[in-house]
Amino acid sequence: MNINNKNIDQIFKDAAHAEKAPEYNPVYWEEMSAILDAKDAKRKRFVYWTISGASVFVLLLSILFTVNYKDVKETTVLNEIRKVEQSLPKETHSEVEYNNTTSKEKEVNIAENNSFSNEKVQDLPQTESNNRIENQFFQSFAEAGKESVLKSSNPQFFDNSNIDLVDDEVDKSIETKPTKAQDVNWDINKLSPLQITSIEENTSRKFQPSLFEPKPRPSYSLYAKVSFGLMENYKTSRPFESGLFDLSLNFEVNTNNLLIRAGVGAQQTSNADLIVSHRKKVYDYGIVEVQSDLSYQGLWDIYIPLELGYKYRKTAFGVGVQANYLISTTMNLNVYENHKLTSSEWFTGKKNGLKSFSTQAYLWLEHSLTPRIALGLKVGTNISGRLVKNSNYFNNSSTTNPIYGQLALRFNILK
Amino acid sequence: MHIDVKLLKACAKNKRKAQEELYKACFLFLMPICKRFHQNEADAHAAYNDVFLKILNNLSKLDLDEVPFPSWAKRVMTNALIDEYRRNKKYREQIQKCDEERKLEFYSKEVVNDAITDYDERSILRLLDYLKPDSKRVFILYVIEGYSHKEIAHIMNMSVGTSKWHLSIARQELREMITKIENEKLNNLAI
């Protein structure tokens, strides 16, 4: 019998088209529905943890920044006041004194003779301490007596044509109040926000940074870091079932508050439940399907972290990546024959089905508690999975890129 | 095979009832493809579930008013089956050795299996299981699914020449098998 190509093709085409449609069984959908439910639950869990994690991160960042900002504000004002006091030359100081005295005199005169000027001063927000300072301010020259003041001042102030000029002078006198620090004996803690702003503006205008100021040099530090936290379980995707513990020695370069860090560390993952499986069919008396599940529980890596970040006062934050090299494992080998567990054995040091190299990426936040100790937070995920692809093994885990969160304690060894 | 666009849009919005309807509808025209690529029912069913999940995941990205769903779904199915085949190639190679033994057994038998001598559609299609996996896939894609050699070469990551070679080998082996079956039938009739 001669069967040509066309016949062969036609025979199989006809057979395929004439084949009975497979019978649908509602049980099939139940199976599929369970898969979809699991997928939805996983997605919801991911969204929940991402939002909660991000919220905690932002909240923590805001708290730390608020604390830092308050600290900066107080320190800056104090420093500026000291700078003003120290940097004023003797003669300049006396000139300012003279100018202020004349301004004050003018102010008194204007206050008595031109009510609009007084109103202008009163327009400024008044607090209790502000009032007290203002009272001291005005008392200091009230004793001098109106007549003598008038004599020492320029008679032109009584000229109506100079009212505008007088107004300007009053404004200037208000602005130069900070230079009266020695006379008035200010209490910095009781300054109103307006006064603080005025001081900052004045000092920034009057005292430009010196051209000879040395450029900031990079600072270096060597520190040890210990981190511990929770990680999503590979098998179940539950975020609290696996543990992650790190210990590392790092080197940090701080250039103008930009941070670069690198180091070396060791990492232990506990209760990982990372499962890879191998299937084979054994043709014996009938066909036996044998499945071996390699359930990795403990994973030990050495790793090299690389972090980039920014330091704002006592708080630093940034991103990091780390390359891991798997050095050892603990593993439970479960063998199933026709879906029934036949043996279970414990191994250490096996790496079958796992990659030696893997990578992680994370966000980090750190706050210095003391010059030596800092407390940190790290949230990240595996970016390249640990499982070998295109091999005899297939993945039997719920996730290959688990998310983790860790608390970190940093100890500065050398700074 | 026509599937209502409204149903597809509801599926894209993750409506479970609509997804069930689509699952039933796709079962009729996608499950046979799975069966052609997989020798046993359980594997075919698992493959169908995997592909259905992929279809649902990608429905929202698809322009449902423009793209004909059945041909797109078939394409997704074929690609997924080939991908799955590639992933498990080493595992398949182990099984293939056993298949070779089975093939020898097939030829050595004096009396051919009753199921084959019956010569119905299912039995004819079962002959494909005796081919080498790559030849089987090329034959199915070219003859039954209607892909061109260029498309097969792209899907299976091989050259057009290799695809043609596999088709030729498949035809030759199938011809030998059918000839043998025909001869057995004639002998049985003579007896």
Image: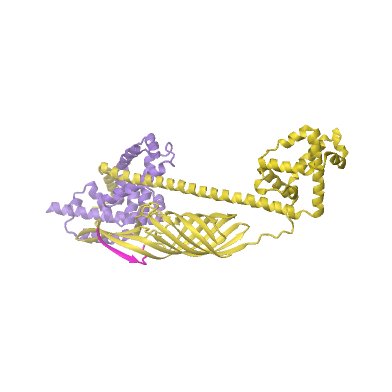
Q: Is residue A125 above or below residue A301?
A: above
Q: Position of residue B73 (x, y in %)?
A: 37, 43
Q: Nearer the viewer, residue B71 or B174?
A: B71
Coloring scheme used: by chain
Which residue is located at x 40 percent, y 38 percent?
B13
Which chain identifier belongs to the yellow chain?
Answer: A
In the image: residue A317, left or right of residue A132: left
| Observer able to see residue B133 | yes
User: Residue, x 44% and y 39% (percent of image)?
Assistant: B63
Q: Residue at x 79, y 54 (%)?
A: A89
Which quarter shows the C terminus of chain A?
bottom right
Which contiguous range is marked in magenta? A341-352
**Residue A234 screen position, x and y as percent:** 38, 55
* Residue B87 inside the magenta-drawn segment: no
Q: Is residue A343 magenta?
A: yes
Viewer-proximal residue among A61 and A178: A178
Q: Tell which of A214 and B60 is nearer to you.
A: A214
x then y, percent, for residue B3: 35, 36
- The image quadrant that residue B95 belongs to is bottom left
- Is residue A6 shown to the viewer in this render? no
The foreground one among B101 and A286 is: A286
Look at chain B in the picture and name its colour. purple
Dominant secondary structure of the residues highlighted in magenta in the image? strand
Residue A349 horizontal side relative to residue A111, left or right? left
Residue sitting farthest toward the left: B191
Where residue A15 sits: x, y (%)? Answer: 26, 46
